[in-house]
């Protein structure tokens, strides 16, 4: 079930009152929410409901074993749990990629045969429930969390707002909210309405419009377009992927708030980032910290020397790239960001110690940083969007050499793209002040305003809504 | 955030967090404020959705109309249509119309992405097909008498079995596609003489037109091609555009409308759109690719329901295909057939679509059926995600959904079409220039096939001859197929 659909609106109109009616009885609420979430998930493909149910049973068992064991056995159980979760992800998401690469390698060496290519369907959101599972078992292994029962874990893993595309919520953030329910505060409700309406507008209008008007045509046939069209299409993809993904997690956070759960923020105006490091503090923030907590730190983080820190950074970001898709272009995209972070750290930090406060930057230097960072990120998006390296090469080649007439970069397309980026460059606090003003309005007026915003998104958008980009990750 | 129920048992195992990435939960993002009851919040949610719904009733009705014919659709429309009518009567539909008008004025219609046609004509056609024009809102929804689409027997396929199929089809087509009055000369004139079409596949009448003569093609006067259809057509158009950029011998426009087909003219009327395409774009070659959305029942204007899988369904589909083909008289129409499908239901519909289109095209010499069934069939004759290329390497040719083609698969179909163009027009010169796209390339094999005769398989260096097919030229010039990038990994799967 997709968020910006009539089906989901009807689903939520049913789930909301039942959820709050059952909330005083945690056990009943949990079973209800498991059922509702499995229904939400089964709407795509009912076969995979069994997969998330089995995953829940296995991880609860692993959690108990890890917690009960001590010393080396605890470590062994932890590795088994992480390995099992990664094996599941690897089988569904990476087997085809792995087999193709192995076969290509064998073929290049003059050997035939190789691995058999299988028709494996990818369960929606498998990356996200795998990340949630790893977070749970590792935190138990680290002694930061005690194991919970099957219904508690199943709700955590399958809670429908974050089930298919995040944000990635730690078990230690979610589970306490099961035991001490949050009240519905005025601020939460206002913020939820704001996030849901804004998310709808970003997805239904901005993302779909920019994709259809310029991004898809230009990236599909770059040879057909001139430099300006290609430049605007690259900026357009930056807008599209931000609007698409942040829309999903904004709606997810808003829906969770209405059900009494606080999720961590996932995006913070990423295109105002003045450095690559700053970008990753603002883009898919819950993935960034997951990679930090469960990959970068276990690799040694910055505690094993300068060289090792750079290696760890690049390895972490490269694997993060592979997580985005089973294709070498995604690996290269991740590696590009890893190298970028390492170089940036090398250049800007020099011998400065970790934790030392940097000298304040001038406004001009900050804007220069923003411009450079934005274009570095955009260059990375070309690798991310293009199906092959050669296709990405064509885009870059034509960007600088094609010239030619403008076909797709019409004034309306350029205006939507520029406004979508410029709104992220507004001074700090502007958005907060607008929302504070909105929060002071009577609840009924807020409801009507959110309804008007939803209407505007529906009226401006096309018939039918394409799936979210991040569903494939 | 610390777990109040399960506080940490041990100190953290790691030193202070690295400063590379801040923790989003560390930032205070919520401040205490007044508590609201769920009932009040629910009222606000209902109000928000109510405001959005009341202002968007037209769009919601359109969504409901897209549902397959059946009980849920009928029930929804029975509620929604009166609400929509009432909303419009008191002017609540005005904001929606204003935004749609503004969207068009501001150039915010991307074009080609949507499905449903806007405008009075399409609405009138929809009403005619849905029966609401005469029966009042919801009263005459044809799906009220819907039959199970999963019933393949066809025994109850036609609700009014005594009425000749051709007559019901003709009545529907006359009403829905040509307005209330029959065109001068009757339906025969409008449809190229197909009224003699029988209920179980009676051969269609002899050809009424011949393909236009081919003209010299060159970069200064490229072949005008329009690729139209559903979600299969859009990427196919992109691939043909890629070919076109290399040799400049074709000029390709795309009119892709997702979720469309011939089964639901109430949602999107392809024959009507084809009339516009022909009039405004003046293509010399039209590529048409639909069918994957047509695995559903069809309803005639007299509310007769034709069940998918029945012989009558195939007959009706052939009539609709013939109507569209006749819109393209005077041009060459390349109708791409459906590939083998993973799911049995899709497979059954794809077979029926191909049968119907073949039948309609058999007597229309300007129509060429591009048969891709064999091309995409796995070794066991069934759907296969991977297929071997000429060197035996397994290539991902289909989409993970078991329906669509992968980028490489689409590229293959584009190469087949390009070869088919080459049969009618001389695309041999100038030689296409290699591009940066594709590190490893393969020369696509000409595999344009026809229902009557397998097409010649050519390569880039030698000419061959072919049997005449339905009035097509017999000499196959050097196919001049551009280099096809061998894309090992198709688009990321979801």
Image: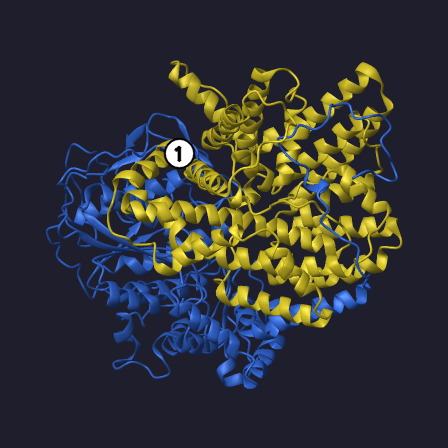
In the image, residue A43 lies at what x, y percent?
64, 52
Residue A438 vs residue B71, the one in the foreground: A438
Q: Chain of mark 1?
A: A
Q: Residue B82, how many percent across, how many down? A: 59, 81
Q: In the orientation shown, which residue stands out farthest toward the left?
A: B216
Q: Position of residue B6 (x, y in %)?
A: 87, 36
Residue placed at 53% from the left, 53% from the top?
A426
* Chain seen in yellow: A
Instruction: Using the image, determine if residue A202 lies above or below residue A56.
Output: below
Left or right: A255 in relation to B261: right
Which quadrant is the C terminus of chain A positioned in?
top right
Q: Residues within 10 Å of mark 1 (few under 14, many from 20)?
A: many
> On screen, B184 above or below A84?
below
Q: Is residue A252 above or below residue B102?
A: above
Along the horizontal axis of the image, is B229 left or right of A9?
Answer: left
Applied colour scheme: by chain
User: Does residue B449 appear in this view?
Assistant: no
Q: Could you say which quadrant of the image residue A50 lies in? A: top right
Viewer-proximal residue, B78 or B174?
B78
A432 vs B480, left or right, is right
Q: Residue drawn 85% across and 55% down?
A: A23
**At x 17% / y 54%, what residue is drawn?**
B471
Which chain is depicted blue? Answer: B
x and y percentages locating residue B53 in the rendered image? 61, 71
The correct choice, above or below, for B269 with respect to A208 in the image is below
Q: Is residue B335 visible in the rendered structure shown here?
A: yes
Between B484 and B219, which is closer to the camera in this rendering?
Answer: B219
> Quick one: SS at disc 1?
loop
Name the residue carrying label 1.
Answer: A388
């Amino acid at each position: 079930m997709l968020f910006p659909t009539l089906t989901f609106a009807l689903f939520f109109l049913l789930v909301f009152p039942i959820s709050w009616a059952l909330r005083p009885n945690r056990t009943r609420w949990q079973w209800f929410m498991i059922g509702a979430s499995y229904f939400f998930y089964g709407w795509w493909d009912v076969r995979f409901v069994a997969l998330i149910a089995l995953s829940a049973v296995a991880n609860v068992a692993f959690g108990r074993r890890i917690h009960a064991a001590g010393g080396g056995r605890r470590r062994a159980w932890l590795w088994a749990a992480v390995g099992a979760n990664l094996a599941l992800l690897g089988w569904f998401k990476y087997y085809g990629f792995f087999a193709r690469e192995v076969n290509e390698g064998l073929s290049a060496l003059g050997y035939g045969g190789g691995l058999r290519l299988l028709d494996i369907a990818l369960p929606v959101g498998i990356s996200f429930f795998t990340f949630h599972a790893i977070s749970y078992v590792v935190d138990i292994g680290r002694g930061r969390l005690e194991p919970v029962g099957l219904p508690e874990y199943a709700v955590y893993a399958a809670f429908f707002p974050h089930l298919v595309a995040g944000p990635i919520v730690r078990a230690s953030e979610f589970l306490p909210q099961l035991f001490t329910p949050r009240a519905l505060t005025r601020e939460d409700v206002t913020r939820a309405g704001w996030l849901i309406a804004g998310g709808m507008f970003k997805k239904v209008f901005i993302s779909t419009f920019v994709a259809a008007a310029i991004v898809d045509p230009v990236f599909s046939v770059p040879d057909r377009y001139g430099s300006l069209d290609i430049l605007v299409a690259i900026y357009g993809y930056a807008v599209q992927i931000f609007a698409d993904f942040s829309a999903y997690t904004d709606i997810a956070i808003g829906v969770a708030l209405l059900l009494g759960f606080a999720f961590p923020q996932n995006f913070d105006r990423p295109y105002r980032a003045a450095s690559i490091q700053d970008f990753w503090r603002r883009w898919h923030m819950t993935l960034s910290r997951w990679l930090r907590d469960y990959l970068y730190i276990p690799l040694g983080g910055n505690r094993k020397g300068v060289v090792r820190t750079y290696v760890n950074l690049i390895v972490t970001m490269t694997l993060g790239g592979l997580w985005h898709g089973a294709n070498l272009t995604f690996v290269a995209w991740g590696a590009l960001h890893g190298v970028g972070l390492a170089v940036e750290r090398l250049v800007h930090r020099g011998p400065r110690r970790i934790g030392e406060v940097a000298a304040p930057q001038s406004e001009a230097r900050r804007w220069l940083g923003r411009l450079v960072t934005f274009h570095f990120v955009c260059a990375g998006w070309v690798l991310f969007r293009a199906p092959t390296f050669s296709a990405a090469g064509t885009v870059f080649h034509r960007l600088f050499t094609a010239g030619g007439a403008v076909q797709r970069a019409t004034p309306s397309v350029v205006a939507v793209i520029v406004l979508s980026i410029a709104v992220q460059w507004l001074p700090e606090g502007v958005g907060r002040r607008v929302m504070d003003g909105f929060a002071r309005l009577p609840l009924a007026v807020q409801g009507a305003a959110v309804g008007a915003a939803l209407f505007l998104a529906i009226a401006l958008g096309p018939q039918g809504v394409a799936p979210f980009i991040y569903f494939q990750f | 955030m610390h777990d109040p129920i399960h506080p940490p048992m041990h100190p953290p195992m790691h030193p202070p967090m690295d400063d590379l990435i801040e923790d989003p939960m560390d930032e205070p993002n919520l401040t205490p404020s007044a508590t609201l009851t769920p009932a009040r919040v629910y009222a606000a949610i209902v109000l928000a959705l109510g405001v959005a719904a009341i202002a968007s009733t037209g769009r919601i009705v359109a969504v409901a109309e897209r549902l397959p014919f059946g009980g849920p659709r009928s029930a929804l429309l029975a509620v929604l249509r009166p609400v929509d009518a009432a909303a419009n009567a008191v002017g609540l539909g005005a904001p929606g119309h204003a935004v749609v008008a503004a969207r068009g004025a501001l150039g915010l219609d991307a074009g080609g992405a949507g499905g449903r046609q806007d405008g009075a004509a399409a609405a009138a056609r929809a009403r005619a097909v849905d029966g609401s024009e005469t029966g009042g809102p919801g009263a005459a929804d044809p799906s009220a008498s819907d039959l199970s689409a999963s019933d393949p027997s066809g025994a109850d396929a036609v609700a009014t079995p005594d009425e000749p199929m051709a007559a019901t089809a003709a009545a529907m087509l006359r009403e829905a596609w040509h307005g209330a009055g029959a065109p001068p000369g009757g339906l025969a004139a409008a449809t190229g003489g197909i009224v003699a079409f029988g209920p179980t596949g009676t051969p269609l009448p002899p050809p009424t037109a011949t393909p236009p003569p081919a003209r010299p093609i060159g970069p200064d006067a490229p072949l005008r091609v329009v690729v139209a259809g559903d979600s299969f057509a859009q990427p196919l158009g992109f691939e043909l555009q890629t070919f076109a950029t290399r040799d400049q011998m074709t000029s390709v426009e795309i009119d892709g409308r997702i979720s469309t087909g011939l089964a639901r003219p109430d949602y999107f009327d392809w024959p009507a759109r084809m009339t516009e395409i022909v009039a405004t774009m003046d293509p010399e070659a039209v590529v048409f690719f639909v069918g994957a959305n047509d695995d559903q029942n069809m309803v005639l204007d007299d509310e007769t329901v034709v069940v998918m899988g029945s012989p009558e369904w195939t007959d009706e589909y052939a009539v609709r295909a013939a109507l569209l083909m006749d819109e393209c008289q005077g041009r060459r129409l390349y109708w791409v057939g459906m590939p083998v499908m993973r799911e049995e239901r899709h497979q059954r519909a794809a077979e029926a679509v191909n049968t119907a289109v073949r039948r309609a095209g058999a007597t229309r010499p300007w129509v060429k059926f591009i048969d891709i069934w064999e091309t995409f069939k796995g070794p066991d004759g069934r759907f296969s995600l991977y297929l071997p290329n000429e060197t035996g390497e397994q290539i991902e040719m289909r989409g993970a959904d078991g329906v669509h083609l992968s980028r490489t698969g689409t590229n293959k179909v584009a190469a087949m079409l390009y070869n088919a163009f080459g049969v009618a027009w001389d695309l041999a010169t100038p030689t296409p220039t290699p591009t940066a796209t594709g590190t490893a390339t393969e020369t696509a094999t000409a595999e344009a096939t026809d229902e009557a005769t397998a097409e010649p398989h050519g390569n880039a260096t030698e000419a061959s001859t072919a049997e005449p097919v339905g009035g097509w030229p017999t000499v196959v010039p050097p196919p001049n197929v551009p280099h096809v990038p061998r894309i090992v990994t198709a688009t990321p799967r979801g």
